[in-house]
């Protein structure tokens, strides 16, 4: 089961033993009648109000505190009543109950007054001041009337002993009208917000009122929704829990809830009427994104859908739509634009054993209340179940959604990262519509960097995909553009500030705000093709200074450094790419985060590029450990194992992913990759990989190859094939490490060519005869060596830094080569 539920509160476990100890449980038989003991309300901080019938059919009200795990008896009515709404103030001295809608003063006991006459659907809710504040000068109370309006009562109180408060006077309590003509309302107890819907001619309007601890209240949001709401009966969410009445209302009214997230997400979730009995429809309005998605799901067993509705749950980063026995749909709130970021589960994957009825509410983030059985659960996504789902999935849509869910929801947990990397190493060729390495690196970087700086999540990429054309079997999705909400506030912080920032991003075309590598790729290619003498400009010096800062910022060279033999070597191309990425990402952030400051942006950019290199190193360490490789992998005296070939293949895919994203690689990556290629590949395949750019010839690896391998016929062929493919400047450096006639012949030929080219239009004087200590009776060679000696005497030395290459070297090499061709011995 993907969702993991832990019972934080259960009437059978947490209340009945307490009642039995006090002699109040004799009349309870919850298995037969759920109306005997049930939950009435959940207050802020998770305080749960419940009611039960005593031995004399008296009606009791109790309170359970989730933090202290203690029960408290609040009040008793000497009558058999059905309590449908109840709320207690922060000091637990005032109690409001829907029985003639009474305001009951618990201290002193039984000071009762009637707030309103009997109604069939009156709900009450105390407002709570700042969390942790013990006393206040007044208690504020919301009252929701069956006549479709909401009032706020101000109850003046005065402090007495032991931090208790009592009502200050017995006159009429001041009241203020909060909302009129509403047909739906939802209370957000944690943030003290009231959402409600007012019907219009063609569509409905969602409004929000924010309540403040030391002020009154403000209308802060208005949004038009294309939702047809049946206004025959008022529907209330989180204003107490009357299971029987809620079931009756549910059959006549819209199932709708509003969820918010820490990152400024605002979603409206609702079920829609469908003409087809074999399918169900529901919509998610992503108000912070400016569009809604309507899903139509084909039901597998229509009989299980009888008298049931979709339950919506708020998991902060995700919204869950759950239909028991049918499906569980997790929708990413931050990135709902691509359908592949939704996890749609059916069958065993969607089963939640403890939630098999439709009386499910989500009063708090990551919390579910089953009103029917009186249990409240903390809900989380199971990391082990998510990994199993990732491993067992056969569709790209499921794999991609599970991958992002794991990285976003669990951040960078090392054990989970290891399991994901192992899965990637096994599924490089099974994912057809996305590159798992690219997605792992991009999404991991996004999750590591974005929590640190406000609005950074809108500027950094979170996926390598530009679009998605995949489908989810049995589900159709329609996307509609909607008008953005109108916010009315000044200097508001927290959620409202983040929501406003999200709306501003939508107005200014959010996709264009994200960093992209197009300019980086073009600039890197241009600079890579520059001539050597142009690489000393101030611009390039700054680029390489950026790269040095990144390398000094790395934390990859830890105690496990020797596990993967990466070398901290000079790599011009990779350092150039590192420095360019730093420069361009810095420019990008400076354009949009001016208020952050240059020093902070410099740090963000260095962290980003260093984390990128660290992630590649992390992948390498995990695959190295998985295939049990060791540092002697960088020797060429034996062939590679099956594990080495697997790691070589993974490194090739890492390189492919890096090229696709124009992403730098850690120092020594190409050297290690080439070393594995030499050990694992046949010669023709190795040379093909070199010619096509899969393998890069590095000085470290080629020098070691030329020095360490002996000159057997097979090794000579390998060495000569490598040497022939070296760039000119590179070749001059490393050929000196191969002491072999073939290499000497090549160097001699090159020396002669360069001497003659540098001679140019110079006129050579008469050759000097008898120059050699032992004259060679071969006139063409005599003439050539004498002419080259004359050129040397004129000061033309192409290999000035390699004194052992001269005319004598050319002569000896020519003689050895000739004798070798003739099959003679050289003496």
Image (cartoon, rainbow, N blue to C red):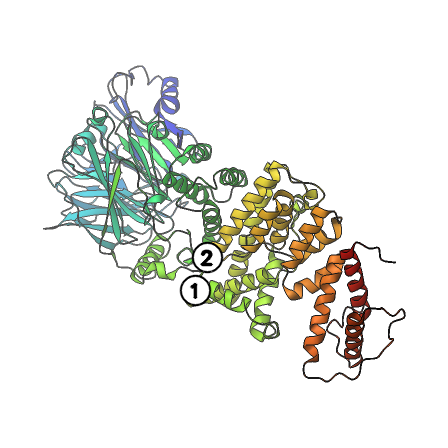
Q: Tell me: residue 530, above or below residue 62.
A: below
Question: Considering depth in this image, is 80 or 412 the residue closer to the camera?
Answer: 412
Between residues 705 and 149, which one lies in front from this camera angle? 705
Between residue 294 and residue 199, name the one nearer to us.
Answer: 294
Quarter holding residue 89: top left
Q: Which image quarter: residue 702? A: bottom right
Q: Is residue 122 left or right of residue 630?
A: left
**416 up-or-down from 448: above or below:** above
- Please, what secondary structure does the residue beneath circle 1 have? loop
Q: Which residue is mark 1?
A: 593
Query: Do labels 1 and 2 touch, CB within 8 Å?
Result: yes
Q: Residues within 10 Å of mark 1 (few under 14, many from 20)?
A: some
Determine the residue positioned at 28% across, 47% down: 267
Judge the density around disc 2: few (<14), some (14-19), many (≥20) Cα neighbours within 10 Å.
Answer: few
Left or right: 63, with 660 as reference point: left
- Residue at the extreme top: 26
Q: Residue 28's spot in the image, x, y percent?
A: 29, 17
- Residue 108's place in the image compared with 477, above or below, is above
């Amino acid at each position: 089961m993907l969702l993991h539920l832990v019972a934080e509160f259960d009437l059978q476990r947490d209340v009945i033993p307490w009642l039995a100890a006090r002699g109040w449980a004799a009349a309870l038989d919850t298995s037969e009648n759920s109306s005997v003991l049930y939950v009435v309300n959940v207050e802020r901080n998770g305080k749960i109000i419940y009611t039960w019938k005593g031995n004399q059919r008296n009606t009791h009200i109790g309170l359970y505190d989730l933090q202290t795990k203690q029960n408290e008896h609040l009040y008793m009515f000497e009558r058999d009543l059905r309590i449908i709404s109840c709320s207690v103030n922060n000091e637990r001295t005032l109690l409001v109950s829907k029985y003639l809608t009474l305001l009951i003063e618990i201290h002193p006991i039984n000071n009762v007054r009637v707030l309103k006459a009997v109604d069939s659907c009156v709900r009450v809710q105390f407002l709570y001041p700042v969390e942790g504040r013990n006393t206040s000068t007044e208690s504020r109370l919301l009252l929701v009337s069956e006549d479709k309006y909401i009032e706020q009562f101000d109850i003046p109180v005065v402090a007495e002993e032991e931090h208790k408060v009592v009502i200050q006077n017995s006159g009429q309590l001041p009241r203020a009208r909060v909302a009129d003509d509403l047909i739906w309302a939802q209370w957000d107890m944690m943030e003290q917000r009231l959402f409600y819907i007012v019907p219009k001619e063609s569509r409905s309007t969602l409004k929000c009122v924010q309540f403040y601890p030391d002020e009154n209240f403000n209308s802060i949001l208005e949004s038009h929704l294309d939702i047809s709401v049946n206004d025959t009966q008022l529907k209330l969410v989180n204003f107490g829990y009357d299971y029987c009445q809620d079931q009756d209302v549910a059959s006549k009214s819209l199932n709708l809830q509003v969820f918010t997230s820490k990152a400024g997400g605002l979603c409206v979730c609702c079920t829609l009427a469908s003409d087809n009995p074999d399918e169900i429809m529901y919509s998610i309005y992503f108000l912070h994104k400016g569009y809604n998605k309507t899903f139509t799901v084909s039901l597998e067993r229509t009989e299980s859908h009888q008298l049931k509705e979709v339950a919506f749950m708020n998991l902060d980063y995700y919204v869950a739509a759950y239909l028991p026995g049918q499906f569980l749909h997790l929708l990413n709130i931050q990135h709902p634009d691509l359908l592949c970021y939704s996890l749609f589960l059916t069958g065993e994957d969607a089963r939640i054993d403890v939630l098999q009825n439709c009386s499910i509410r989500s009063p708090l983030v990551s919390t579910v209340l089953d009103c029917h059985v009186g249990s409240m659960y903390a809900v989380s996504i199971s990391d082990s179940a998510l990994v199993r789902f990732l491993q067992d999935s056969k569709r790209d849509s499921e794999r991609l959604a599970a991958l992002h869910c794991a990285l976003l929801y669990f951040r960078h947990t090392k054990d989970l990262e290891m399991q994901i990397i192992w899965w990637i190493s096994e599924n490089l060729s099974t994912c057809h519509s996305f590159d798992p390495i690219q997605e792992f690196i991009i999404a991991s970087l996004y999750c590591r960097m974005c929590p640190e700086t406000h609005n950074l999540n809108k500027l950094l990429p979170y996926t390598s995909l530009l679009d998605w054309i995949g489908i989810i079997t049995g589900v159709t999705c329609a996307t509609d553009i909607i008008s953005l909400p109108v916010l009315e506030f000044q200097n508001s912080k927290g959620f409202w500030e983040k929501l406003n920032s999200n709306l501003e991003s939508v107005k200014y075309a959010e996709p264009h705000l994200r960093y992209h590598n197009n300019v980086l790729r073009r600039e890197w290619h241009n600079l890579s093709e520059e001539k050597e003498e142009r690489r000393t400009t101030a611009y390039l010096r700054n680029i390489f200074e950026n790269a040095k800062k990144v390398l000094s910022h790395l934390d990859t060279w830890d105690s496990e450094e020797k596990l993967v033999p990466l070398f901290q070597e000079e790599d011009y191309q990779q350092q150039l790419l590192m420095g360019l990425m730093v420069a361009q990402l810095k420019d990008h952030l400076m354009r949009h985060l001016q208020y952050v400051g240059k020093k902070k942006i410099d740090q963000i950019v260095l962290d980003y590029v260093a984390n990128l290199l660290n992630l590649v190193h992390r992948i390498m360490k995990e695959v190295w450990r998985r295939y049990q490789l060791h540092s002697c992998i960088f020797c060429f005296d034996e062939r590679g194992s099956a594990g080495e070939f697997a790691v070589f293949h993974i490194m090739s895919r890492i390189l492919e992913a890096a090229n696709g994203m124009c992403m730098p690689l850690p120092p020594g990556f190409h050297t290690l990759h080439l070393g594995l290629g030499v050990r694992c590949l046949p010669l023709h395949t190795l040379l093909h990989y070199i010619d096509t750019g899969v393998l890069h010839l590095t000085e470290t690896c080629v020098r070691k190859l030329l020095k360490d391998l002996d000159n057997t016929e097979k090794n000579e062929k390998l060495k000569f094939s490598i040497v022939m493919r070296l760039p000119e400047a590179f070749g001059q450096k490393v050929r000196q490490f191969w002491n072999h006639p073939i290499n000497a012949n090549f160097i001699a030929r090159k020396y002669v060519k360069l001497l003659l080219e540098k001679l140019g239009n110079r006129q050579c004087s008469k050759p000097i005869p008898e120059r050699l200590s032992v004259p060679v009776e071969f006139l063409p060679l005599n003439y050539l060596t004498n002419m080259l000696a004359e050129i040397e005497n004129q000061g033309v030395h192409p290999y000035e830094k390699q004194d052992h290459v001269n005319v004598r070297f050319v002569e000896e090499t020519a003689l050895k080569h000739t004798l070798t061709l003739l099959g003679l011995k050289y003496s």
